[in-house]
Amino acid sequence: MFSYLISVLAVTSILTWGVVGGSPAASTLYLSQTGTQFSINLPSNSSDVYFYFTSPAFSWVAVGPGTKMAGSLMFIMYSSANGLNVTLSPRIATGNTEPTFAKEIQVEALPGTTINNQSFVLNAVCRNCRSWNGGSLDVTSTTQPWMYAFGPTNDITSDSPSAPLRRHRDYGHFQMDMVQATGEGGVPGPSTSMNGASLIGGVIIDGDKASIIHAVLLAFAFLIMFPFNVALVGFFKTAKLHMWFSGLITIFIIIGFALGIYVSGEYNRSKHFDSAHQIFGFIIIAIFIGVAAMGGFQARQHKAAPATSQPSSNGRREPTKLDSTHKWVGRLLWVLGIVNGGLGLQFSDSPMHTQIIYALVTVALALPLAVVYSCIWRKRKVRQDRDEDRDVVLEAYYATQPKPPY
Ligand code: HEM
Ligand code: HEM
Ligand SMILES: *[C@@H]1O[C@H](CO)[C@@H](O)[C@H](O)[C@H]1NC(C)=O
Ligand SMILES: *[C@@H]1O[C@H](CO)[C@@H](O)[C@H](O)[C@H]1NC(C)=O
Ligand SMILES: *[C@@H]1O[C@H](CO)[C@@H](O)[C@H](O)[C@H]1NC(C)=O
């Protein structure tokens, strides 16, 4: 009986609240695949904008009025540093690049904002938010264009409104009825149906392929192709294979470098080319080109003047100072390249498991290489000793022969 009374009271109070308080006018986008809801409210007695935004907690989730990134205001949410609440970051992009925090936008998260069951839940108000530097919201439009985007699955946990983002895993367009959203002000409530909104086109799958190809090409070139190239020199006596393979590595490195430059332009953290990974990368690639040029120069020199370079009896030539520089700088380059790959993974905030796998692969490659190297080195040493003996014999033999008549 008592509990019956309580529930009657509860129902009545909800009804009265509904009548007296009214519910805010709203237009709602609902994406059933992800359970993402974005509802907007435009109070008729102010120029504020209220919104409710919920979505699975990908690294970041964003919406913004407009059809393209450039010049559009975007509301981006990601996890706070302690992982319990949402950091709301208003940003504007200048092109198809990472948007930059727009501190003049007065947007704030309201009570009820939280991360619940791995979903962001955001209640927010943006003051004087119907026009901004570079764009505006057309409150008379019933088909105001909007866009949404989801970040990749890496973690971002930051209280900073300018935390580094990675390019969207996917994005899309929709339109909303701004007239329907205008009326009684307030944060709209949860809903699971479209209302005054519709999708334009489907989800566009994206992702930062250039960054991945940059990493794969350069890591493969330094980690795998470099030592293989040295092994070629050790196992085959001719320099021809080594030259062709070095040419192939150069192609990998140039394409990887070009992609590195392109990717640098996408992100705020990299567009000034002042990170350790990029500066190191420039130096390494400059040295690589130097070493390759040195190698090419040597090869030409040997070809042009084989007689002056004193071939010994088995066609091997005496190592020159240039040779040993080429070798040692090559080895240094190998180590620097591997280290810079690690710096790159850190720079791009790659997941810890990727970094650990990279470190393990490096060790797994370096250990057998050490064995192979020492074998080649010992074999060569034995052969050199033998050659030296033979050279002494040959010299003695030539000394007994009459000089040719020229
Ligand atoms: C690190 C951050 C971001 C980067 C590097 C980035 C980069 C890009 C790039 C390169 C494109 C062109 C894709 C193509 O033509 O294939 C693009 C398109 C797009 N992006 Fe972003 N984006 C970022 C963040 C965002 C955010 C926060 C939104 C918010 C909704 C967004 C929405 C869109 C939309 C709607 C398009 C298609 C229309 C257009 O080309 O502008 N992006 N983005
Ligand atoms: C030895 C040469 C280099 C190696 C081995 C290397 C390797 C890598 C690796 C493994 C990553 C991680 C990528 C990811 O997680 O998706 C990376 C990221 C990156 N690299 Fe390099 N890199 C080199 C040189 C350069 C150079 C010369 C530049 C440009 C000037 C550059 C620009 C970048 C940028 C901007 C990123 C971050 C991409 C992002 O945040 O998604 N790299 N690099
Ligand atoms: C707008 O209306 C709401 C509710 O009717 C009220 O609480 C609020 O103070 C009003 N705001 C302005 C700026 O008049
Ligand atoms: C999250 O932040 C909002 C706005 O600052 C606050 O009102 C709310 O209580 C916070 N929620 C939790 C769970 O800390
Ligand atoms: C948590 O979210 C998942 C999927 O997003 C859903 O299936 C599940 O019912 C939710 N659990 C609760 C307690 O809301």
Image (tube, rainbow, N blue to C red):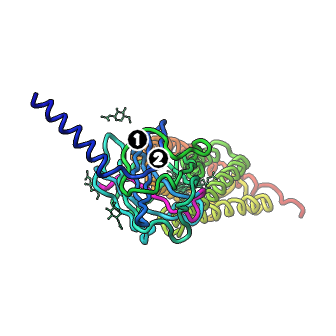
Nearest the viewer among 18 and 309 is: 18
Q: Among all residues in the image, which is located at the extreme left? A: 2
Q: In which quarter of the image is the C terminus?
A: bottom right
| SS for callout 1 | loop
Q: How far apart are marks 1 and 2 (CA)?
A: 8 Å
- Say whether residue 328 is visible: no
Q: Residue drawn at (44%, 53%), measured in percent from left and top? A: 40
N-term mark: 1 or 2: 2
Query: Is 294 left or right of 130, judged from the image as shown?
Result: right
Nearest the viewer among 293 and 373 is: 293
Question: Residue 367 appears in which quarter of the rendering?
Answer: top left
Nearest the viewer among 179 and 65 is: 179
Callouts 1 and 2 close, C-beta under 8 Å: yes
- Say whether residue 357 is visible: yes
State which region is magenta.
67-81
Q: In this view, does 124 lie above or below 171?
A: below
Q: Position of residue 111 (x, y in %)?
A: 28, 55
Identify residue for label 2: 28
Q: In this view, does 339 lie above or below 356?
A: below
Numbered circle sitting on residue 191: 1
| SS for callout 2 | strand
